[in-house]
Amino acid sequence: MAGVFEVEVDGVEHDHGLEHHNEPNKFDVSKLSPEEKWSVEHAKMHAKHKGHEAMHAEMVLILIVTLVVAQLVLVQWKQRHPKSYNLVTLFQMWVVPLYFTTKLHWWRFLSTWFIFSVITAYISYRATRKPLACTTPRLVYKWFLLLYKISYATGIVGYSVVMFTLFGINLIFRIKPEDAMDFGVSLLFYGLYYGVLGRDFAEMCADFMASTVGYYSASGMPTKHLSDNICAVCGQPILVDVSEEGIIENTYRLSCNHVFHEFCIRGWCIVGKKQMCPYCKEKVDLKRMFSNPWERPHVMYGQLLDWLRYLVAWQPVVIGFVQGINYVLGLE
C-alpha cells in the first residue's frame, strides 16, 4: 500500500498522513524518484531529532574521547607487544569484512574472500610445516608476489577510474557518474584490502620459514652458517653465478656480499616487507636492487596500509564500543 507522509518544509509542518485527503500538499511516496524519497527521509530524520541538540553534543563528545583513548591504547599495544598486536590485527582484518559483507549480501566480495582464504590457508599451512619442504619457500613467495601484483594493479585501475569520473571522462562513454564511481571505489578497495592482507600473511610466513630453515632469526644470531652457494631465504643451492644471465631467474648479491635467488630476495623485500639481509640483517639497498621505482616499498605506501589496517580492523570495534556506551546511557 502506498504511504503518505508528513514533512516540515521551511519551518511549516505539512500533514501528509492518512487523514485530510482533500489537502493539495498530499503526495504518494511510491511515485517519487529515489532522490525525492531520500529528501523525504532526510526531512523525517530532522523532525525526529529536533530539540535533541544537547544529547547529540554528548554523543559526539563520547565518540571523540573514545577515538582518542582507543588510538593511544593501540599505539602503546603496538609498541610494547608488536607480535600480539599484529596477530590480532591480522585476524580482524580477515574476519571483520566477512561479517559486514555477509550481512549486506555482497556475494562478489564473499566469493573473492573465500578463494583468497582457501589458497592462503593452504600456503600458510605449507609454510608452517616442519621439516620445511625444499619447494615451499618458492611456492609461498610466488603466490604472495602474484597477489601483490594483482592487488597493486587493481588499486591503480580503481584509482584511475575514480579520477576519470571526477574529470567527467565517463560521460564520453555514456556511463553514469554514480556507476563509474562505484566501480572505481570497489576496485580501489579490493586492491588495498587484499594488498595489505596478503603482505601481512606473507610477512608471517616469511618469518616462520626463515627461522625454520635456520639462517634467519628475528632476534639473535643465525642458527646455521651460510655457505657461499646457498640462498639464506629458501636454503637451496644457487646454480647461476651473479655475473651470468639466468634462463628463469638471476642471482642477486647484496652490499653485504651475500647472494640469493632473484625470486627469493624479491619476495623477501617486496612481499615480506623485509628491508634487510636475511642472514646478517644489514640494510638492503633497494635502489640498487630494483631499478623499477614501483617495486620499492615506500614509506608513504606503508603508512597508507597502516591506516587501512586501522580502518578495517579497529574502526568497527571502536564504533561498536561507542554505540554500547550510548545504549547504556540511554542516548539515541
Image: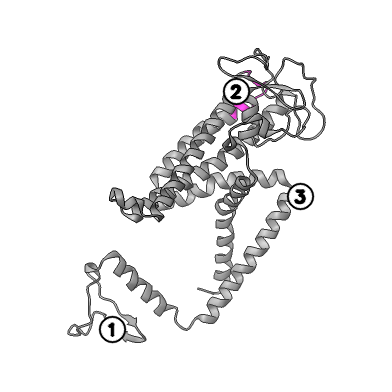
User: Taking 330 as reference, is 38 left or right?
Assistant: left
The residue identified by callout 2 is 138
* Amino acid type for the residue under numbered disc 3: Arg
Q: Residue at x 29, y 64 (%)?
A: 34
Tag 1 secondary structure: loop
Residue 128 in view: no
Q: Are marks 3 and 1 in contact (CB under 8 Å)?
A: no
Q: Which residues are magenta?
A: 125-134
User: Taking 26 as reference, is 54 left or right?
Assistant: right
Please tell me whether mark 2 or mark 1 is closer to you in this view: 2
Q: CA distance from mark 2 to mark 3?
A: 33 Å
Sort mark 2 into few (<14), some (14-19) or many (20+) by Cα contacts within 10 Å.
Answer: some
Q: Residue at x 77, y 32 (%)?
A: 282
Toward the viewer: 310 or 87? 310
The residue identified by callout 1 is 15
Q: Predominant secondary structure in magenta?
A: loop
* Amino acid type for the residue under numbered disc 2: Arg
The residue identified by callout 3 is 80
On screen, residue 252 above or below 268: above
Q: CA distance from mark 2 to mark 1?
A: 71 Å
The first of marks 3 and 1 along the sequence is 1
Please tell me whether mark 2 or mark 3 is closer to you in this view: 2
The first of marks 2 and 1 along the sequence is 1
Q: Residue at x 28, y 51 (%)?
A: 174
Toward the viewer: 99 or 187? 187
In the image, residue 140 lies at what x, y percent? 58, 27
